[in-house]
């Protein structure tokens, strides 16, 4: 749709304005969705109005007023005049401002501690990202009905918790900000490498996460971790075009055509992280962005500064208790000190029971065993990894790696 980008950008702003006036999350969202449908129908034919945000707000507000009239009439049977005098909130002036912080406030609401992480992700995509329930269900590969229930429960939780539509006070803001960054990070990860399905990447989901990070960064540019998260996503997403081949086959980092990488994104990411690292205390997103920058700035795979990456992972590993970080740290150790050292760290990780059935553990161990020329073990681990992933491109890649090594053994 020609106006999709504009409507997606305006949707959370309009929802914020309607929610602030009417205090009903579910009804406000329905009204905004109807306004977006009306815009998608009328604007291509009649042109975009001079103030599209005010146009959407007015249409949504009329829908809310109509709904309030209908609900109140059904419940209380009052006259139309009494309704106008006592219950209906007037539609906003078409030229009024919807409030530049509405998008950020919505993000704070969606990431309220009362919600589970999965509910927060879904609600953020729905309310702030402007995605339909069907699109969110497709992104996470669950039935639309399941996703609808998840989002409905999240809205009900917000309603029951009586969260006011306002910017949280400073202490609340700090706590929720970390949740916001975590949700955006998870959204990006799912977009960059889809956990299930026929496509390795969901570029639309990754782009939406970057857009949301930009919103937060614009409002709070002094926060070094926000800058770090945005830099991390830009530097990682910059490789998107080189990650798959013409048949959607996976191309590992060391085999990618680096001329396909987005140099403008890399330059922006490097600038962001370089500035962020000078602001004092360094956080996990900044460290991950610095690691991504080292990869992106290497002209060829053989030019990668693995000792620097290992040093960064060593710091990150002490800062966060994350099994994926431990796994990536093991790879860096293997690249600097040899595969046996990396395999030793993986064995320690596996002994803890973490990532026991995760395909990434088997895939990484297969890679390190191949580096150590233990081909039989590598084949077994590649096959075990393939059996544990729901991503078709990853499964095909892992099985192809196992088949390649079997061919080597026969020679």
Image: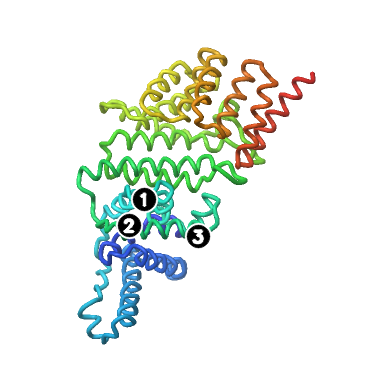
Q: Earlier in the sequence, mark 1 or mark 3?
A: 3
Q: Considering the numbered disc 2 on the image, is that residue within a helix, a strand or a loop? A: helix
Structure colour scheme: rainbow
For the residue carrying disc 1, how many other residues have a C-alpha within 10 Å: few (<14), some (14-19), or many (20+)?
Answer: some
Find residue 153 and report its image quarter: bottom left
Residue 357 percent location from the top left of the image: 57, 34
Mark 3 or 2: the one toward you = 2
- The residue beneath circle 1 is 115
Q: Residue furthest top?
A: 337
Q: CA distance from mark 3 to mark 2?
A: 32 Å
In the image, residue 130 sits, relative to residue 353, either above or below, namely: below
Pick whichever, 294 or 361, lies toward us: 361
Q: Considering the numbered disc 1 on the image, is that residue within a helix, a strand or a loop? A: loop
In the image, residue 263 sits, relative to residue 158, either above or below, namely: above
**Tag shown at residue 158:** 2
Q: Earlier in the sequence, mark 1 or mark 2?
A: 1
Residue 335 percent location from the top left of the image: 53, 17
Please give the count of numbered marks on the rendered protein. Answer: 3
For the residue carrying disc 2, how many other residues have a C-alpha within 10 Å: few (<14), some (14-19), or many (20+)?
Answer: some
- The residue beneath circle 3 is 1
Residue at the spot x=44%, y=70% of the render? 42
Say whether marks 3 and 2 touch (CB < 8 Å): no
Q: Considering the numbered disc 3 on the image, is that residue within a helix, a strand or a loop? A: loop
């Amino acid at each position: 749709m020609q106006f999709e980008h504009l409507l997606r950008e305006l949707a959370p702003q309009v929802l914020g304005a309607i929610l602030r006036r009417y205090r009903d999350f579910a009804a406000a969202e329905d009204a905004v969705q109807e306004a977006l449908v009306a815009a998608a129908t009328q604007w291509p034919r009649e042109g975009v109005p001079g103030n599209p945000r005010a146009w959407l707000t007015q249409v949504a507000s009329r829908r809310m007023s109509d709904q309030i009239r209908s609900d109140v009439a059904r419940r209380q049977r009052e006259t139309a005049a009494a309704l106008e005098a006592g219950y209906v909130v007037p539609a906003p002036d078409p030229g009024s401002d919807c409030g530049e912080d509405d998008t950020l406030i919505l993000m704070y609401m969606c990431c309220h501690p009362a919600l589970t992480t999965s509910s927060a992700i879904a609600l953020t995509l729905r309310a702030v990202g402007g995605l339909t329930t069907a699109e969110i269900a497709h992104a996470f590969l669950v039935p639309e009905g399941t996703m609808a229930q998840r989002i409905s429960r999240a809205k009900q939780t917000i309603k029951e918790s009586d969260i006011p539509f306002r910017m949280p006070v400073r202490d609340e803001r700090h706590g929720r900000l970390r949740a916001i960054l975590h949700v955006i990070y998870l959204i990006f990860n799912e977009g960059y490498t889809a956990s299930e399905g026929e496509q390795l990447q969901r570029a639309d989901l990754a782009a939406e996460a970057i857009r949301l990070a930009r919103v937060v960064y614009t409002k709070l540019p002094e926060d070094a971790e926000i800058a770090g998260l945005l830099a991390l996503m830009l530097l990682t997403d910059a490789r998107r075009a080189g990650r798959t081949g013409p048949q959607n086959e996976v191309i590992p980092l060391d085999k990618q055509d680096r001329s396909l990488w987005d140099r403008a994104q890399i330059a922006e990411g490097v600038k962001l992280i370089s500035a962020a690292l000078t602001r004092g205390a360094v956080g996990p997103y900044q460290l991950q962005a610095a690691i991504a920058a080292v990869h992106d700035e290497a002209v060829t795979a053989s030019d990668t500064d693995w000792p620097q990456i290992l040093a960064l992972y060593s710091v990150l590993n002490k800062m966060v208790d994350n099994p994926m970080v431990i796994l990536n740290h093991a790879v860096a150790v293997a690249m600097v000190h040899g595969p046996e050292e990396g395999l030793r760290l993986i064995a320690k990780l596996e002994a803890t029971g973490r990532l026991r059935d995760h395909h990434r553990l088997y895939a990484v161990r297969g890679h390190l065993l191949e580096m150590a020329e233990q081909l039989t073990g590598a084949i077994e681990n590649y096959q075990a990894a393939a059996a544990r992933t729901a991503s078709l491109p990853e499964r095909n890649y892992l099985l192809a790696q196992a088949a390649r090594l079997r061919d080597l053994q026969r020679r």
